Image (cartoon, rainbow, N blue to C red):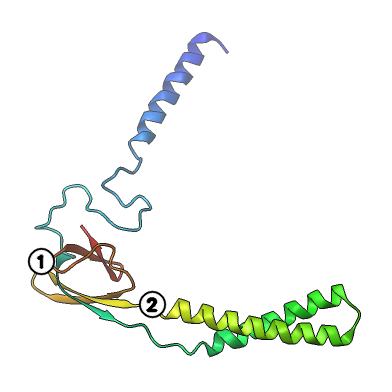
Amino acid sequence: MNTRNEFRLLGLAAVATFALAGCATGPGYYGGNSSPSPGYGSSTASCYDCGTVTRIEQVSGTASTGTAGAVLGGLVGAAAAREIAKNQTDSEGRQNTATVAGAVGGAVAGRAIQRNVSGGANYNVYVRMNDGRTTVVSQSDLNGIREGSYVRVYNGRAWAQ
């Protein structure tokens, strides 16, 4: 290759790089962030899915007895303990004891895990939209939203603006 062709190729690569850089996502777009932000040319007056929080209700989570977690945890604990006991001893009595202990431990852990996962609080967020209508969204966290906050209702939840 001669020098002239190399410079042409280098110049073409530079132009392509600058053209592709213009396609990159800027801070006005969503860019993978979980909370949307207004894009180019948006203002609070033209935001059709924005409004002001008028009320927030705390709704307690559904009470869970933990039965399903206990059953699944017991089964997993029994199977794991039995397998470990098979590798450690030849005694049938010790294998049975390990199986029962694993089932009890797994049931206790499974029940606790299910209660912790499903026992959280939820919030009903009432929003008066810019066009006058009122909407309610239910979400598990507020992320700094309070009554009087200006929010955007997007993807089934309210996002602070």
**Which one is nearer the viewer's eye here, 94 or 133?**
94
The part of the image, by quadrant, that contains residue 56 is: bottom left
- Toward the viewer: 129 or 144? 144
- Three-letter amino acid code at the position of disc 1: Asn
Up-down relation of residue 32 to residue 72 (above or below): above
The residue tagged with tag 1: helix, strand or loop? loop
Residue displayed at 16% across by 48% down: 41
The residue to which callout 1 is attached is 130
Q: Decide: is 26 above or below 139.
A: above
Q: Is residue 25 left or right of residue 109?
A: left
Question: Closer to the camera, 84 or 19?
Answer: 84
Q: Hey, which residue is sitting farthest right in the picture?
A: 90
Displayed quadrant of residue 95: bottom right
- Quarter of the image where the N terminus is located: top right
Q: What number is the disc on residue 5?
A: none
The residue shown at (53%, 80%) is: 112
The span from disc 2 to disc 1 (Cα, nearest Å) is: 31 Å
Mark carried by residue 120: 2
Whether residue 140 sits left or right of residue 89 in the image: it is left
**Would you say 107 lies left or right of 160 here?**
right
Q: Amino acid at mark 2?
A: Gly
At a point 68% along the width and 80% down the height, the residue shown is 77
Foreground residue, 84 or 18?
A: 84
Closer to us: mark 2 or mark 1?
2
